[in-house]
Image: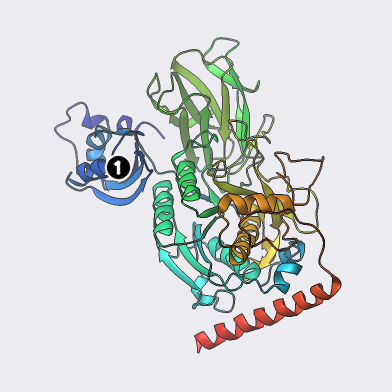
Amino acid sequence: MRRAWSLLPALFVGDAEAAEPAPAAVITLRLAESADAQATLNAAAALPGVRALAVGAVPGGGGLIDLSASPTRWAELAALPGVVHLGEPWRPNAKAVQSEGLDTLDLTAWDAAGLTGRGVTVAVIDVGFSGWDQAAEELPPSQVSLVYGEAGGDSHGAAVAEVILDVAPEVELRLYRVTSAAEFIEALTLAEQDGVDLVCASLGFDNVWHADGGSPMSLAVDRLHDAGVAYVAAAGNEVGRYAAGALSDADGDGWLTLGGAERVYLNDSGGLASVSLRWDEPFGAAAVDLALHVEDGGVDCDVSDEAQRGAGDPFEAASCVGVSLASARVRQVGGGSAEGLMAWIYSPGGVGGVELATAGTLTLPADARGALSVGALPVGDDTPAAYSSQGPTDDGRLKPELVGPSGVSTLSFGAGGFEGSSAATPHVAGLVALWIDRARRDGPQEITDGLLLRAVDLGEPGPDSVSGHGAARAGDLPPRCGCAASPTRAAAPWTLILALFVRVRRREACALAARSAIV
């Protein structure tokens, strides 16, 4: 995306013969940490033709505000006190019948104890819930409600909700559909105000900020955690979509290589090539000025050239449609030397022509300190999916914490069709809901600690940045003492028989209730 005002030269050269005003567009204001979000919102709303859409305020100042405004107002909005950046909204990406994952979770003792999630409220934040109200047997209307946004055209969130109810069939689900980072933060705030016990989010924001826990989205998750609300996050499915490496300009022509490659090829999707560039400087204080070129057959089709030079963000994003051979190149425009600077190129369709990044490919806010982050483990396998995002975070913390079942069946996605960390995350969220049912005095950290103790280690002994502490398991019942104790022994065979009976009966009861609700 070019700098907003570079697209509108008439606004700055006094073109008295400018044509009809351009139609309103959705833009996002990013605020400084010291900014008062309410004051900035009031000032923006006072401008004619400006309409507030979402306010994602971060406690202590800062955050994101989505506005609808004509381009003729963008310069005024960018100049408001506290605004550090005006641009396109950051859009979330989805981290895309009874789930087969249940058999892997070792719920024997928990089922025998009658844990169902009764009295536990779960917020599901997603990009769409299409069909949720048409699947009453899987998503009973007595337990499920859409409370934020419209259902949208994507059924991804409905599949997430199905899996949670498979694991914890008596929880209450509240659905929040978001389309931007500001809406995501606003939804977290509303979920806390609604009194939810747990948030499950199988979505993420890719390459828009460093994975160091400092993004507005990650800080909002930390706040939720500190308020006593658990947050279960998809780690992402981003291996294969990132190229990473040190920048260099050995020949001095201004075109930079990344990891030794001057050109990164983009695996376009249906003729669309979308790409972003991020490099290792602080957001709001980048001194190296770079431009991102997207080419089709070696000819520019889009250029992103935001100004950095000490006060900008180390980020560029561009896209082209109707491409046949898309690639991305990085050019230095000015500022300090880029030599040796670490950089990341991301494209949702995948990248090629360069060594692919595997480590450090987390989606945001899976990097949040308060998030229980979950990678993808195909059902029946003991190796995480090749695409499953890996840690560590950019500041060296272990992520993900766990991996969960993927490649499972749902009504929304069909037999075995629900893949990725999107499917893994609600399995773990269901475990968290059952834990809360058992031990309400335990906070998010105690629950996380308890689940990590119960995980089945994968690969080399010990925690790692591929599978975290291992595959999610329920194991022995959580203690009621408000502490997370280590599991001790497997359940007896008679307990297994009782557990299977209990699970079948409670699923039948839920289905009967759903049919009654339809009538």
Question: What is the image's colouring?
Answer: rainbow
Q: Please give left or right for residue 195 compared with residue 17 in the image.
A: right
Is residue 329 visible from the viewing direction of this image?
Answer: yes
**Residue at the outermost right position:** 493
- The residue indicated by pointer 1 is 37
Q: Disc 1 residue type?
A: Ala
- Could you say which is closer to the camera, residue 325 or residue 64? 64
- How packed mark 1 is, by other alpha carbons closer than 10 Å (few <14, some 14-19, many 20 or more), is many
Q: Please give left or right for residue 68 compared with residue 221 in the image.
A: left
Q: As displayed, is residue 308 above or below residue 90?
A: above
**Residue at the outermost front position:** 481
Secondary structure state at the residue bearing disc 1: helix
Q: As displayed, is residue 248 above or below residue 102?
A: above
> Where is residue 397 drawn, in percent x and y?
62, 35
> Where is residue 503 drawn, in percent x and y?
70, 76
> Where is residue 150 drawn, in percent x and y?
41, 64
> Where is residue 191 drawn, in percent x and y?
43, 58
Which quadrant is the N terminus positioned in?
Answer: top left
Q: Residue at x 76, y 59 (%)?
A: 379
Is residue 179 visible from the viewing direction of this image?
Answer: no
Q: As displayed, is residue 43 above or below residue 455?
A: above
Q: As displayed, is residue 138 above or below residue 73?
A: below
Q: Residue at x 66, y 83 (%)?
A: 508
Q: Number of marks in the image?
A: 1
- Could you say which is closer to the camera, residue 86 or residue 258? 86
Q: Residue at x 34, y 43 (%)?
A: 27
